[in-house]
Amino acid sequence: MGGASQLTTNMKRNIQMSANRSGHMSAEVITTDGSMQFRVTDGLDFYQQSNIHCIEADNGQGTAFLVYLPIGIQSGSFSLELSGTTPKVIHVTGNSEAELYPGTLELTVGGDAEFAGRFSGTDANGLQVSNGSFRLENQAGA
């Protein structure tokens, strides 16, 4: 977990430009106390670095999801892995950042949205994440 946390901290520290964009993200997180619905419908934060796109959704209640996509990624089905240049989905609760691994991401690039996808998996804290989905709308005027 330290590696993912350091990776995320470094990525956030190196943000070049962040913008709130139209879009939404949701997921179901299964805990020992039952399930929690995560939902953000009022826009997503989006930024780009030299080698990644980051889509971030924060529900304002201490929970967020980050989706990191390598620049140049194409539509497809991906296994979420801990290393390499594969896409990453990170579940943030309080001060804990837990990467989904193992997990899957079904991604659509382009079309009527810039990025859209579905994800599921187990985060590094052992929490099950299911029915995850996101959609980042095309930038206005693009």
Image (tube, rainbow, N blue to C red):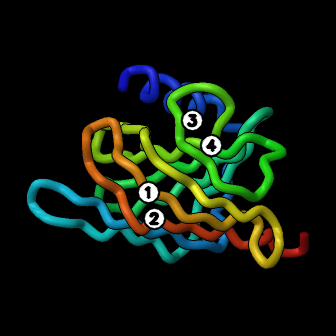
Q: Position of residue 34 (x, y in %)?
A: 13, 65
In the picture, the disc for residue 95 is none
Give SS at disc 4: loop
Using the image, determine if residue 51 lies above or below residue 28. above
Residue at (65% x, 55% y) in the render = 77
Q: Position of residue 105 (x, y in %)?
A: 57, 54
Q: Which numbered mark, 3 or 4, is in the foreground of this view? A: 4
Precedes in sequence: disc 1 or disc 4 = 4
Precedes in sequence: disc 4 or disc 2 = 4
In the picture, the disc for residue 87 is 4
Q: Which residue is mark 3?
A: 12
Q: Which numbered mark, 3 or 1, is in the foreground of this view? A: 1
Q: Which residue is mark 1?
A: 120
Which residue type does callout 2 highlight?
Gly
Give SS at disc 1: strand
Q: Which residue is mark 2?
A: 132
Q: Which numbered mark, 2 or 3, is in the foreground of this view? A: 2
Which residue type does callout 1 highlight?
Ser
